[in-house]
Image (spheres, rainbow, N blue to C red):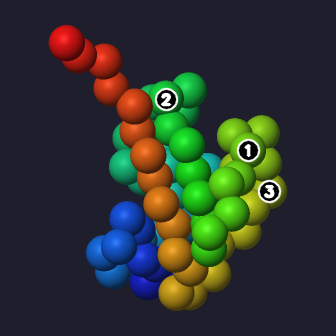
């Protein structure tokens, strides 16, 4: 399925937002997700179905100094 992830067209196999986050091997407790302009709570990722052409933003926080 083709999705727009952080402004780039990506083709990945995913049914839910959780599948998308897992695909990118991100630390789930350090990620904020937005789908079509709406922030999606982490507890809803598994129930949030993804569809062709959806715009998804993944913001992954990292430590540093």
**Residue 21 point in image, percent of width and height:** 50, 49
Label 3 to label 2: alpha-carbon separation: 19 Å
Q: Residues within 10 Å of mark 3 (few under 14, many from 20)?
A: few
Q: Residues within 10 Å of mark 2 (few under 14, many from 20)?
A: few
> Nearest the camera: 56 or 64?
64
Label 1 to label 2: alpha-carbon separation: 12 Å
- Between circles 1 and 3, the one closer to the viewer is 1
Q: Residues within 10 Å of mark 1 (few under 14, many from 20)?
A: few
Mark 3 or mark 2, earlier in chain: 2
Secondary element at tag 1: loop
The residue depicted at 63 percent of the width and 81 percent of the height is 51
Q: Quadrant of residue 26?
A: top left
Q: Is residue 54 left or right of residue 39?
A: left
The disc label shown at residue 15, or none: none
The disc label shown at residue 41, or none: 1
- Between circles 3 and 2, the one closer to the viewer is 2
**Residue 62 point in image, percent of width and height:** 33, 26
User: Could you tell me if residue 56 is visible in this image?
Assistant: yes
The disc label shown at residue 30, or none: 2
The residue depicted at 72 percent of the width and 68 percent of the height is 49
The residue depicted at 52 percent of the width and 87 percent of the height is 53
**Residue 2 point in image, percent of width and height:** 44, 83
> Nearest the camera: 59 or 15?
59
User: Could you tell me if residue 10 is visible in this image?
Assistant: no
Q: Is residue 19 left or right of residue 64?
A: right
Secondary element at tag 2: helix
The residue depicted at 35 percent of the width and 73 percent of the height is 7
Secondary element at tag 3: helix
* The C terminus, quarter of image: top left
The disc label shown at residue 47, or none: 3
Label 1 to label 3: alpha-carbon separation: 11 Å
**Residue 33 point in image, percent of width and height:** 57, 51
């Amino acid at each position: 399925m083709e999705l727009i992830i952080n402004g780039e067209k990506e083709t990945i196999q995913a049914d839910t937002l959780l599948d998308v986050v897992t695909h990118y091997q991100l630390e789930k407790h350090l990620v904020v997700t937005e789908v079509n302009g709406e922030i999606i709570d982490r507890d809803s990722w598994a129930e949030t179905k993804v569809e062709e052409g959806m715009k998804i933003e993944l913001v992954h926080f990292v430590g540093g100094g």
